[in-house]
Image (tube, rainbow, N blue to C red):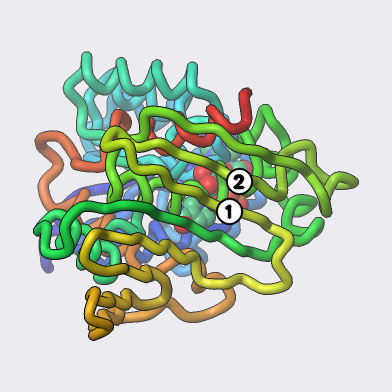
């Protein structure tokens, strides 16, 4: 029998948990325990794994020498309280985005990670897309000179039922925001990763179509100033009639990049080059992207040392959107 790479526990058995389970198994690791505070979700998760240990309190998994790595896949306000317990004992933790529901909690997590010297990762899987990596390489290479301008668009469709099914998603306390923190944060992260650190952010937000159901914003604009002085703008709404692939357009001195479903590189002389994803996500939730497995495999490859998308790195996108929301 093959020795599993690592023994993992999965905390939070909701919508995205199956993607984590698939990623854990695909990279050769083993699932040793599931945890959910909701008994029905706990019982229904991973039905094929009938013998797997199931616990209702993550603290039952502390101090165990058969848990090498933990995935925290809970609502936003439950990322930090759960993760801190494992970070305190230096168990590697992979946390779903965003880092936290609030900046204060996020700062606690950044500080705890640094002082424990723990391996903590945050799931910005779209950085692993072939198109994102090609855009990053092209910008870093200097082939087209410096970035002069950028724009991001997240035009998605979320109904009142999406929020009614998981009430935390529509509340300030549970989620820390709406379309910005839950959907557009991936694109905010990519814009700041590609164009550079953001030193100032402002914007507008409102709840225009879902105010009967949610407290948080369904639509927002973000205006960012990067350390280089470049300005970028992002538009985000959950009121689009369909789920469009998120789009980032970047102008450089010698060409433009359109990063969407594919990456279209246009040189100043009009010649174009197109990079496509080697594999595309399918199904109703294809807008999540297809790179979760790559990020999980990278996190599990070696559980010693720092992960490159660590809390300090994940803090950046949260900081940007919190400047816009003001709370
Ligand atoms: N990276 C992505 O593309 C992506 C996509 C979807 C969701 N997410 C993120 O994944 C996380 C979960 O989202 P979801 O849609 O699966 O939510 P969900 O509500 O469907 O699932 C969360 C589960 O966590 C459980 N839970 C709550 N508090 C807990 C605690 N203290 N201990 C153990 N279990 C607890 C709930 O009972 C629920 O079953 C969120 O952070 C979300 O933003 C990321």
- Say the numbered circle drawn on residue 235: 1
Where residue 327 appears, as percent x and y from the top left, is 63, 23
Q: Is residue 9 above or below residue 89?
A: below
- Say the numbered circle drawn on residue 221: 2
Q: Is residue 111 above or below residue 231?
A: above
- What SS does tag 2 mark? strand
Q: Nearer the viewer, residue 107 or 56?
A: 107
The answer to which image quadrant residue 255 occupies is: bottom left
Where residue 167 appears, as percent x and y from the top left, is 74, 43
Where residue 295 appears, as percent x and y from the top left, is 27, 56
The answer to which image quadrant residue 43 occupies is: bottom right
CA–CA distance in space, label 2 to label 1: 5 Å
The quadrant of the image that shows the N terminus is bottom left
Label 2 crowd bin: few (<14), some (14–19), many (20+), radius 10 Å: many
The answer to which image quadrant residue 138 occupies is: bottom left
Residue in the picture at 58% in, 32% down: 324
Residue in the picture at 47% in, 57% down: 152
Residue 134 visible in the snapshot: yes
Q: Nearer the viewer, residue 113 or 85?
A: 113
Q: Earlier in the sequence, mark 2 or mark 1?
A: 2
Total marks drawn?
2
Q: Nearer the viewer, residue 309 or 263?
A: 263
Residue 57 visible in the snapshot: no
Residue in the picture at 57% in, 58% down: 15
Q: Nearer the viewer, residue 230 or 263?
A: 230
- What SS does tag 1 mark? strand
In the image as oriented, which residue stretches furthest toward the front? 269
Q: Are the two marked residues, 2 and 1, in contact with CB atoms closer than 8 angstroms?
A: yes
Q: Is residue 59 above or below residue 69?
A: above
């Amino acid at each position: 029998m093959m020795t599993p790479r690592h023994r993992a526990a999965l905390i939070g058995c909701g919508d995205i948990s199956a993607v984590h389970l698939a990623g854990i198994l695909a990279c050769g690791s083993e699932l040793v325990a599931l945890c959910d505070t909701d008994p029905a979700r706990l019982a229904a998760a991973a039905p094929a794994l009938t013998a797997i240990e199931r616990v209702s309190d993550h603290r039952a998994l502390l101090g165990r020498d058969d848990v090498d790595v933990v995935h925290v896949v809970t609502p936003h306000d439950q990322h930090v309280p759960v993760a801190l317990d494992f970070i305190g004992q230096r168990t590697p933790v992979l946390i779903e985005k965003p880092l936290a529901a609030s900046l204060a909690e996020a700062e606690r997590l950044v500080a705890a990670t640094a002082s424990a010297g723990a391996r903590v990762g945050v799931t910005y899987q779209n950085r692993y897309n072939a198109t994102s990596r090609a855009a990053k390489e092209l910008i870093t290479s200097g082939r087209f000179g410096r970035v002069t301008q950028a724009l991001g668009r997240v035009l998605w469709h979320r109904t009142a039922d999406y929020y009614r099914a998981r009430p935390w998603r529509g509340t300030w306390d549970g989620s820390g925001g709406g379309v910005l923190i839950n959907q557009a944060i991936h694109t905010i992260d990519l814009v700041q990763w590609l164009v550079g650190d953001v030193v100032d952010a402002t914007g507008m937000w409102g709840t225009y179509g879902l105010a009967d159901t949610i407290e948080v914003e369904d639509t927002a604009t973000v205006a960012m100033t990067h350390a280089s002085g470049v300005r970028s703008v992002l538009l985000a709404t959950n009121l689009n009639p369909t789920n469009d692939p998120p789009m980032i357009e970047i102008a450089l001195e010698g060409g433009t990049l359109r990063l969407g479903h594919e990456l279209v590189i246009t040189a100043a002389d009009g010649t174009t080059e197109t990079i496509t994803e080697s594999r595309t996500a399918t199904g109703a939730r294809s807008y999540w992207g297809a790179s979760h497995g790559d990020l999980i495999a990278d996190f599990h490859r070696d559980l010693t040392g720092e992960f490159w998308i660590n809390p300090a790195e994940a803090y950046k996108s949260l900081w940007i959107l919190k400047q816009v929301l003001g709370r």
